[in-house]
Amino acid sequence: MKDIKAKILSNKKISDSYYKMTLDAPYIAKTAKPGQFVQIRCSDGLDPLLRRPFSIHRAKDLEILYEVIGKGTEVLSERKPGEHIDVLGPLGNGFGLPSAVSSQLSAILVCGGIGVAPLVFLAEELAKKKIKTTVLIGARTKNLILCEKDFKDLSAEVHIATDDGSCGHKGFVPELLGTRDMGQETRVYACGPKPMLKSITAICRKKELMCEVSLEETMACGVGVCLGCAVKVKGQGTRDKGQGCELVCKDGPVFDAKDLIWK
């Protein structure tokens, strides 16, 4: 992990409220693993004061995909190529990649909204290992579907679900997973809204499939100091019937789905 001043190489609006920023940050790009994240100080001033967390979208150059949802990301969207920006990373623990690859091994990536951001990096690493990969993308409507072409360029099989039925399956993306015939060597990786992840977890538990989920939480520090991103997990401590807490920034953001306790 390093705290660096990275030069902005590009910062483009790609659709609606979504932007993609590329940074010259060779140390972070070289050492990052899929699922890890960076903390970025969006402004050179004091407003906003705190850094914002962003998943690492790609790591050839350091690339982040983000949605403008508040003051920090609004300021970030106005930053120009050539400017320098304060970046801390890579942070957290990423997805577990299989060390041995069999002919029966396959991966299913389930993306909801901006949750697609870390899964393109993961798909790139799965492609390098020649693991058959299927991607299920969920969005509210057709215009909000992200990264479909990126996944197809990696030879992944892609299926779409939209809430309004404007593209692909009409409904929520977990429904696409629930109807699939999946072998026991299928690994499921997911990132998106909590209700989606909760449904994905329930499906995988029922089918006894390995599943990892990346949680999206507000993180003030990103390194386990502020304790603001605690989640309940099984098997930790004894005060509360074997339940305990772990930090999304330090212990995650990727967790084994079977360890999480959903509210």
Image (cartoon, rainbow, N blue to C red):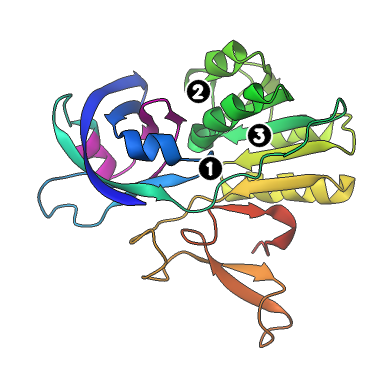
Give the structural element (helix, strand or loop) at label 1: loop
**Is 150 displayed left or right of 240 in the figure?**
left
User: Is residue 65 in the magenta section?
Assistant: yes
Residue 79 position in % (x across, y down): 17, 31
Instruction: Please name whichever residue, 159 or 44, is drawn nearer the observer in this view of the structure.
Output: 44
**Range covered by the magenta-colored residues:** 53-76
Look at label 2 and name its amino acid: Leu
Q: Residues within 10 Å of mark 3 (few under 14, many from 20)?
A: many
Q: CA distance from mark 1 to mark 3?
A: 13 Å
Left or right relative to 117: residue 195: right
- Category of crowding for the residue at label 2, using alpha-carbon neighbours closer than 10 angstroms: few (below 14), some (14–19), many (at least 20): many
Which of the 4 quarters of the picture holds residue 246?
A: bottom right
Quadrant placement of the C terminus: bottom right
Going 69% across and 30% down the picture, which residue do you hit? 171
The numbered mark at residue 192 is none
Q: Earlier in the sequence, mark 2 or mark 3?
A: 3
Q: Residue at x 64, y 44 (%)?
A: 196
User: What's the amino acid at mark 1?
Assistant: Gly
The percent position of residue 164, horizontal first and vertical second, equals 60, 24
Res 172 visible: no
Q: Earlier in the sequence, mark 1 or mark 2?
A: 1
Residue under pointer 1: 35
Q: Position of residue 13 (x, y in %)?
A: 31, 21
Q: Is 31 one of the magenta-colored residues?
A: no
**Which residue matches tag 2?**
146
Q: Which circle marks residue 110 in the picture?
A: 3
Residue located 36% across and 70% down the image: 226
Q: In the rendered image of this protein, does residue 29 appear above or below residue 90?
A: above
